[in-house]
Image (cartoon, rainbow, N blue to C red):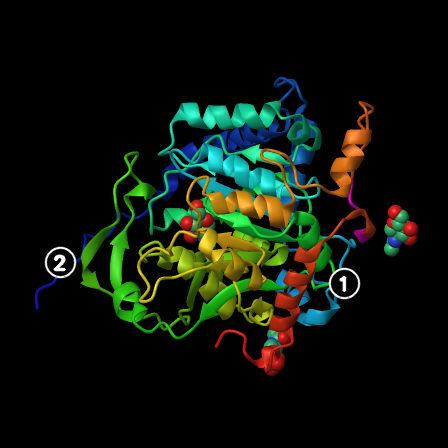
Amino acid sequence: METKPPPPPLPPPQLQRRGKWVVPLLASFFLSSLFISASIFSSSSSFSSSAAASLSRQALLLLSFSQIPTPIGDDPLFVESKLRSRPLSAAAPARPVPRLAYLISGSAGDGASLRRTLRALYHPANQYVLHLDLEASAAERLELTAIVREDPVYTRFRNVRVVSRANLVTYRGPTMVSNTLHAAAILLKEAGDWDWFINLSASDYPLVTQDDLLYTLSSFPRDLNFIEHTSDIGWKEYHRAKPVIIDPGLYSSQKTDVFWVSEKRSVPTAFKLFTGSAWMMLSHQFIEFLLWGWDNLPRTVLMYYANFLSSPEGYFHTVICNAREFRNTTVNHDLHFISWDNPPKQHPHLLTLNDFSRMVSSNAPFARKFGRDDPVLDKIDKELLGRDPDGFVPSAWYDNLKMDTGNNLPFAVRNVTELRPGAGSQRVKALITGLLSADGFEKKHCI
Ligand SMILES: *[C@@H]1O[C@H](CO)[C@@H](O)[C@H](O)[C@H]1NC(C)=O
Ligand SMILES: *[C@@H]1O[C@H](CO)[C@@H](O)[C@H](O)[C@H]1NC(C)=O
Ligand SMILES: *[C@@H]1O[C@H](CO)[C@@H](O)[C@H](O)[C@H]1NC(C)=O
């Protein structure tokens, strides 16, 4: 075998000439680091800050990179260790009534259904992010933003945000996952303290009031993750795990469908694949774990799923089930009523009045998929939510608001008695207690 000849040896360092450039080099390095630290720390003032001050700041800057001293023993300080030591039941709720953070997303033409879903889901204790993807026109997004901004209730509680820098979302592509993570990141950064993140679309609708849901959830541990999942990936091994897809939405400004690479890949051995429903309710801790990335698992799995068809049906499931500190928090349900045809088609069938009683008896808090302004939505408004068209769901907070004539009293739900739960709370409670008390619940996480 032929190899390249080795490169000629470097000429010996010219020792006698070193003194000529070492001093200016060191001096310029020192000066430039002084300037850099001065410009970092004195953004508002000019360059007038004295050299002594910037020197001490430089020392501070250097100090902040030194190792954090470990408390006792040699265990490094990791957040996971705190999570691990905390048993599931001991997740004592910090406040009596939990708060929910919702993403409601839609595409071109979904503005009106998105507003309707928001109205039906609205509660001042919650947080909302609305996203109209890049397929929707700028005019439609502006209209949505204007309507939110002009609504006296939304502006008073300031808990509805519209994503202004919208994402291109490719159906079945990883841009769906990045869009969900984007919204969750906005909610983490701007929306304060909340307990669960719920991802909905404009074709979803609630079957219970928020008072029902908040009331019921107040009696359950806040670290539960409602995520329907299985490791039995079946036909998906051949059709999903092995093919490699590219989502042009990751790099192109034009919307096109995902495309397939001719090579196949093998099933991962570094982690186990899980799959399940794309609808879920995830705990605040798990969202932090996904987004902060102090553990590399969420990041590597995300990069793996960048080439996976229908990644929303696998990314979250695979991360949670491969993370020892989270797998025992899973509850195998997506909290949705979804009706599949038999045999299942690619999309669930659109729910109509004929599905109403099955929807109610499923005890699920949400259902999908609804056609725009289908009559069954009016029936849900009237019989399950007690809501007038375009009105808010009747509740204690809304009554208080109507009585509060202009003095803008702050409003916070501090206490479950400030909620007005109805029959829906019994249904959700039956569903969740049924799931948590099912035979072998403790042993059936992530199987
Ligand atoms: C989130 O919502 C969108 C609807 O816009 C959906 O298509 C997606 O699969 C959902 N799930 C996840 C986990 O991102
Ligand atoms: C999770 O649950 C299983 C079964 O009850 C138990 O053996 C295991 O120690 C638990 N893991 C953690 C991290 O709590
Ligand atoms: C909740 O509020 C009611 C009055 O609004 C009060 O009577 C009750 O003691 C409060 N409960 C708790 C647990 O703070």
What residue is shown at x 77% (from left), y 55% (from top)?
Answer: 94
Residue under pointer 2: 5
Mark 2: which amino acid? Pro
Q: Residue furthest left?
A: 1
Distance CA(mark 2)–CA(mark 1): 69 Å
Direction from residue 437 to residue 404 in the image, left or right: right
Asked which secondary structure carries label 1, the reply is loop
Report the image quarter containing ligand 2. bottom right
Instruction: Specify which label sits upstream in the sequence, 2 or 1.
Output: 2
Direction from residue 432 to residue 263 in the image, left or right: left
Quarter of the rendering containing residue 378: top right
Marker disc for residue 227? none
Q: Position of residue 207 (x, y in %)?
A: 58, 52
Front tag of 2 and 1: 1
Q: Nearer the viewer, residue 370 or 244?
A: 370
What residue is shown at x 48% (from left), y 43% (from top)?
Answer: 375
Residue under pointer 1: 92
Q: Residue furthest front?
A: 354
Asked which secondary structure carries label 2, the reply is loop
The quarter of the rendered structure image containing the N terminus is bottom left
Q: Main secondary structure of the magenta part?
A: loop
Q: Position of residue 60 (x, y in %)?
A: 67, 40
Inspect this view and state whether residue 86 appears. Answer: no
Boundaries of the magenta span = 412-416
